[in-house]
Amino acid sequence: MKQHLKRIASPRTWTIDRKKQTFITRPRPGAHSFSFGLPLGVVLRDFLSLSSTMAEAKKTINNKEILVDGKRRKDYRYIVGLFDVLSVPSIKKSWRALFDKKGRIIFSEINDTESGLKPCKIVGKTMIAGNKVQFNLHDGKNIITDAKANVGDTLLLTLPKLEVKEILSLEKGVAVFLTNGKHSGDNGKFKEIKKNEAIYVREKQEIETAKDYLFVIGKDKPVIEVKTG
């Protein structure tokens, strides 16, 4: 496993200065794919300006509570990805990882109420003993419940206990967020599946995309803020 990463070779979803230095911190393998997340130290230094150097970022992580989805993280290479909530209790601030309209990772500041919620897309499920289902979520989490939901639906979880607050099914009229493709970072309302393509509506315009790119984030309206610029 490589321990280094050249800036010029980093994913296009990373909004970093690629010519400032040769190398950048490489995230450890974790819950999110390489292009869907950033190492915690880089987030603190380059995105949130909570430190000016990586050495400062490491000290901040070691000396202060830095929470990701309500759990303290001490590894500066821990990968923080799509819809994760990063909180710093000492300054009473929280941010959510999103994609902007160009498909790049950004961190949008959120309020205390929203910092306790996280939408997670179901990417797989397995029947287990007791007629319960284990849902595999987009961020690597596994939730065991007797709730009824399908692959492609979204579980709205409370943080940090990871309790299912609501099930957001992929059905006509729900609010969706695009996680890939040329419309990554866009949002609108799901209309239908037609000829193997998903259609969603944004400002009265119908747009085609792949079904796998849809991420349900609400029923009539999003349950989280999606300020993507």
Image: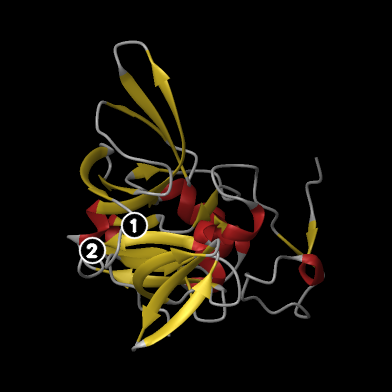
According to the picture, the residue beneath numbered tag 2 turns out to be: 223
- Please state, as top left, top right, bottom left or bottom right, where the C terminus lies in the image: bottom left
Residue at x 42% of width, y 79% of height: 228
Residue 21 bears which disc, if any?
none
Q: x, y percentage for residue 194?
A: 48, 66
Q: x, y percentage for residue 175?
A: 30, 68
Colour pattern of the rendering: secondary structure
Kindly check if marks 1 and 2 are in contact, taking CB atoms under 8 A apart as contact. no
Residue at x 55% of width, y 61% of height: 196
Q: x, y percentage for residue 193?
A: 45, 63
Q: x, y percentage for residue 66?
A: 39, 51
Dot 2 surroundings within 10 Å: few (below 14), some, or many (20 or more)?
A: some
> As displayed, is residue 163 above or below residue 10?
above
Residue at x 23% of width, y 52% of height: 116
Residue at x 22% of width, y 61% of height: 114
According to the picture, the residue beneath numbered tag 1 turns out to be: 87
- The kind of residue tagged 2 is Val
